[in-house]
Image: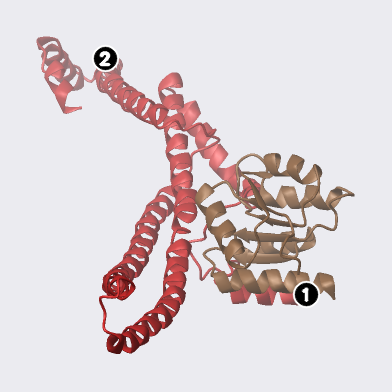
Amino acid sequence: MNKDMKILVVDDFSTMRRIVKNLLKDLGFNNMEEADDGNTALPLLKSGGFDFLVTDWNMPGMTGIELLKQVRADESLADLPVLMVTAESKREQIVEAAQAGVNGYVVKPFTAITLKEKIDKIFERIEA
Amino acid sequence: MNANVDSLLSQENCDRAKQLVTAIESGDRENVLQIVSDMSSLVESDLFQNVGKLTRNLHDTFRDIGSESESEFFDPAKFPDARERLQHVIQLTEDSANTTLDCVEKALPVIQERGDRAAELLERWERLCKKEMALSHFKELSDDIQAYLSGTKDLSATLQSGLNDVLMAQGYQDLTGQMIRQVINLVDELEQKLLDLVTSASSESVQGAIQAKNNSKQDERKSLMQGEGPQLNKDADDVMSSQDQVDDLLASLGF
């Protein structure tokens, strides 16, 4: 896994963005940007250069699930690994995310270890 | 409505009451109906005035808070849910505060001790540099410095883990924020319905509200796709209560 990869962290709560960024920093990642919903995230992603997307689901404006669908529908972003970190925990929602092509799904409240495990797993798969 | 009771104690109403008694005794149906209707309208207009005042207050309060969410319909069944959500907010904030305080209380004396010890070693080191220390004491100082450095290295790892706990404990802000937002939406709905009630002051709008409530099932999927925030009832069949359950579900989907 390339520790220099560029990561976009999307959550409408700035505290959660800080938590996720700090955890990622602890895992050795330093190249991060943030956005507060899908509407602000999508243009950033389209402007290029991102290797990994970590997004919440429930956000005003464009939700995380909609963002995921738009990412998969965009030719240049279709293969971008996406980890969902969200409080949404209904079966139907997780199935929806899986069908939309999410690479990992972490439910809040989560632990640093869970986040690390899911990220490791995503990139093990990609690199395999 | 108590404040307006006085206005009901008028001579005019007393006369009406007497007329009502006379009308009943004489079996004058038309007059009985007319008088009862007149008198009840006195109370009804009070009711609407009070609802109006309440709505105005609510409206002002929430305009001050700056809530902008759109109201669709009002479902009274959401109240118990709102209460539970606020209870859960208290629980989450309390847990987080305790976790943070535990970490701080553990870290503070340890840091203090490290600082004191460093000050003491520094003083001895400076004496050595100024050649005020007998060489025989140098071995002792060097052992103490080695022990200090080794202890500090271990401490740094412990502190780092404690600070990570504090970091994770701040996740409550996101979760409670989502819950409070839902309660604000509920109060917005209530406010809108009260406004409707006053505006039309007729039974139609209440009927409309009941109708809208019946349509709520259709909104369920829409709500799921928008996101519902933390689920309070972790035991419900359609709710994954842990990361393990999520992982199992994803595994069953071929992940």
Q: Which residue is pictured at 70% across the width and 73% down the height?
A: A120
Between B156 and A77, which is closer to the camera in this rendering?
A: B156
Residue A39 in which image quadrant: top right
Between A110 and B16, which is closer to the camera in this rendering?
A: A110
Q: Is residue A8 above or below residue B33?
A: below
Between A89 and A15, which is closer to the camera in this rendering?
A: A15
Residue of label 2: B31
Residue B119 in which image quadrant: bottom left
Which part of the image, by quadrant, shows the C terminus of chain A? Answer: bottom right
Q: Give chain B's shade.
A: red
The x, y position of residue B164, in whole percent, is 47, 67
Between A75 and B164, which is closer to the camera in this rendering?
A: B164
Residue of label 1: A124
Amino acid type shown at disc 2: Asn
The x, y position of residue B206, in whole percent, is 47, 32
Q: Residue furthest top?
A: B12
The x, y position of residue A109, in whole percent, is 52, 64
